[in-house]
Image (cartoon, helix red, strand yellow):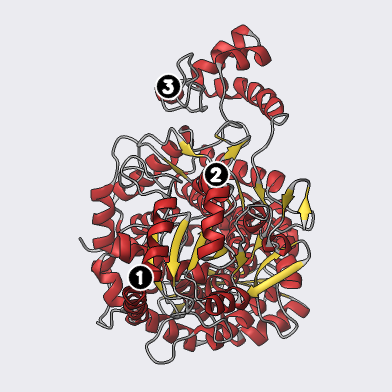
Amino acid sequence: MTTGTKTANRLIKEKSPYLLQHAHNPVDWYPWGEEAFARAKAEDKPIFLSIGYSTCHWCHVMERESFEDEEVAEILNKCFVAIKVDREERPDIDHIYMLACQAITGQGGWPLTIFMTPEKKPFYAGTYFPKESKFGRPGLLDILATIHEQWITNREELIKAGEQMTKALQSQPQDLHRGELGEYTLQEAYHSLQENYDETYGGFGSVPKFPTPHNLLFLLRYWYWSGDKKALSMVKKTLESMHRGGIYDHLGYGFARYSVDQKWLVPHFEKMLYDNALLAMAYLEGYQVTGKERFARIAREIFAYVLRDMTSPDGAFYTAEDADSEGEEGKFYTWTPAEIKAILGTDLGEEFCRWYGVTEAGNFAGKNILNRVRGEALITAGDPREEDHLAGACQRLFAAREKRIHPHKDDKILTSWNGLMIAALAMGARILSESRYLEAAARALEFIWTHLRKKEGRLLARYRNGEAAYPGYLDDYATLIWALLELYQADQKPAWLRRALTLQEEQDRLFLDERQGGYFFTGRDSEELLTRPKEVYDSAIPSGNSISALNLLRLARLTGREEFTDRAKALFRTFSGTVSRYPAGYTFFLTALHFALAPGRDVVVAAAQSGEKLRRELAPLTRIFAPTTTFLYRSEGKDAEELKALAPFTAKMRPLEGKTTYYICENFACRQPTTEREEVRRTLAEKKTPLAN
């Protein structure tokens, strides 16, 4: 197949935007599948596996330098079978070979480059390679030539290395040291975060600096339980500093993936759906705790970005936006003073430049990333009306920027990342009393439920251009259950809770390791790879096991089904050895542990009304930060019968005297039901007993 003067390779038939980006390379790419492995075996060739994603800057660089190059293509096509994989479609494949790369080189990242036998056994690995060797970095041409020669003359050693690596992957140790996680585990995580905290700019660690929102969610809970003001101050400083930095898009909103410097000034410009979902949650909870309207506004701006730019016509959410436009990183986002003054005029332009750190020298390749890092004193001491004054300027600059060539958008729909954004929007609807967020969350959920489930109910992982594909992974189930629980808390409809239970039961059937505990990343019905991974580490996204631990505990409290509590406790035991080695690497897992250890409170709201009217009545309660409180909603009519089937203990809980009635249970003891909302508000606002230091 040809397009113009370029011949299309096999990737032209794929749906993945990443694979399609490589569909006109001279490299004879195969998608992952039996056709490629059969050819490698038949022609006795090693496999060149390249894994990346469509908004990855260095993936683009390697494509331009090497995969569009005839010289590189010639040796790849002659001596190897080349396979391309989209890591966002196939995180199972990516996970296994990333572990191999980390074992071989001590580091990982994308693009991920793997050399392996026709039996899929890796013997050499790396990330980005330039075409030619330079700066002490081996070039791809030299590597290809060396491995081809070794395959011809010393194949036994390569096969042996592949066998050894495969055995190491298959015996990836699940620390079977079983113990009890407890208060001290939370304390250890907190102290590690405190040691790594940047007192000047917030955040944790050095550079590159990632937002890692689940660290902030954990710290808010630690503060809530312990009363340690330092935990809260770390959260506030980090939320404020990230927003001031260039990692935040001050015109179009939304956060970039990470910062390459300590100040949050220079971002890696790609925007990921999952980052923005988790950060919206952190700002929402920051607003609940502090009452800072700025945090609520930032959450609203994140949602404005997602609903404007990252939402499909059918209501589901796209995956990511690229760092590059017109082949240049950050070009879409950067400005010169002259460009700004041409749009705003000299006086307003100079004022805007002063506030947003725009100078003639620039802060990025001679241009400027808009930021408020240098203007921090202005913002801290300035009149809030100044920001309102500049809001119109931001709108005018945004309108001008919209006329630029936009970065590439990865418009595939991932179940797991949609689950995170649905959960965030549902939280936003509840905390900010915004019905449009609830409508957006429900619409996206219905899209997933309709288009990414097989007839028998099996979740699928990816949708694009009318095609749903790949059996769903653990993360797809865990995040969608989370989304359904948040929808239930925001919308009060027991149908959301029923769906969450349906998915949890299917997750247990497909993913649970009955022998050693925990959930596998892939289901029993998924493709058999070199190994079946199981992950608990909370990296950029909380792990499926961490999310599941919290889901199970919430489901147990909402339904009274103790088997869910037992399963959550089993997760704590299963991963106790792993988590105990470095608790700060598992902060979302510890969020679930906090939910289990802290005194719990359950509120059944029995009301004669439902829908928007009830939501407005409950708004003063849902704005309160009460992370170990669960709400059940019992409205009269059909919903009451459905809730009774899901949570039988609610059967006799009815409105008293025709008024909304609150049934509150805490620490296995129930209070007298009350119709006084203010009494309930005071109860929810009560701080828990401080954690012993």
Of 250 and 10, nearer the camera is 10
650 or 555: nearer the eye? Answer: 555
Nearer to us of marks 2 and 1 is 1
Which mark is in front, 1 or 3? 1
Other residues around mark 1 within 10 Å, as few (<14) / some (14–19) / many (≥20): few
Mark 3 near mark 2, Cβ–Cβ under 8 Å? no
Cα separation between marks 3 and 2: 32 Å
Q: Where is residue 564 in the image (x, y as percent from the top left)?
A: 48, 84
Using residue 477 as the reference point, say whether residue 687 is left or right of it: left
Asked whether disc 2 touches disc 1, contact meaning CB atoms under 8 Å apart, the reply is: no
Query: Disc 2 designates what residue?
Result: 270
> Mark 1 sits on what residue?
153
Cα–Cα span, label 1 and label 3:
71 Å
Q: Which of marks 1 and 3 is nearer the N terminus?
A: 1
Does residue 608 appear in the picture of this structure? no
Q: What's the residue type where badge 1 is placed?
A: Thr
Label 3 vs 2, first from the N-terminus: 2
Residue 401 location in percent, x, y?
A: 67, 28
Distance from the alpha carbon under mark 2 to that under mark 1 = 43 Å
Relative to the observer, which residue lies in front, 635 or 389? Answer: 389
| Residue occupying image coordinates x 50% and y 64% | 79
SS class of the residue under badge 2? loop
Task: Tell me the residue that label 3 is attached to.
Answer: 381
What's under tag 2, amino acid-wise? Glu
